[in-house]
Image: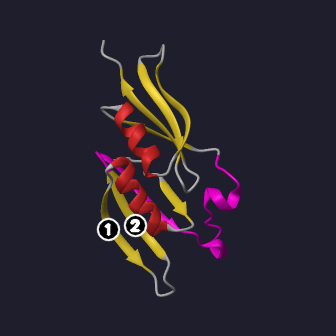
Amino acid sequence: MTAVVPYLCARDARAALDYYSKAFNATEDSRIEMEDGRLGHAEFSIGDAVFYLSDEYLEMGVASPQTLGGTPVALHLTIPNVDAVFEQAVAAGATALRPPADQDYGLRSAVVVDPFGHRWFLASPLAQ
């Protein structure tokens, strides 16, 4: 089996887990807390998609988009109802970059940036 799992980093990983739960109905699957109080590793799911998450570990080169001043990476999340999830994500604290709109390539899509600096493309297939 081959899989790619996005490994996100946040300044406050516990708050990020809470946000992803509210914004995307994420389910926390596991958590490892370190003695220094930081979150060493967490796993969460959004539907069938699996994600990893940790706090920053600058001493090991693990930095969040907030520390780096942004990120060149975006996450593309395919969901049944882009409009509802877009509204839910913004209500939970995301910044709306592009509201939901039908695209010529067969998706209804939107773009948000979560409170931790991660950019999310939200998309639903248009009915054929």
Q: Residue at x 39, y 47 (%)?
A: 3
| Mark 1 residue element | strand
Q: Quadrant of residue 128?
A: top left
The picture places residue 11, in percent across and down from the top left corner, at 57, 67
Q: Residue at x 35, y 58 (%)?
A: 44
Q: Quadrant of residue 88?
A: top left
Instruction: Check disc 1 and report the residue beneath it.
Output: 30
Q: Tell me whether circle 1 and circle 2 mark residues in contact (CB < 8 Å).
A: yes
40 with respect to 25 (left or right): right
The picture places residue 31, in percent across and down from the top left corner, at 36, 71
Instruction: Check disc 2 and report the residue beneath it.
Output: 42
Instruction: Give the colouring mode of the picture.
Output: secondary structure
The picture places residue 98, in percent across and down from the top left corner, at 55, 31
Q: Earlier in the sequence, mark 1 or mark 2?
A: 1
Q: Is residue 28 above or below residue 25?
A: below
**From which residue to which does the magenta span run?**
46-71
Q: Residue at x 58, y 69 (%)?
A: 56
| Mark 2 residue element | strand
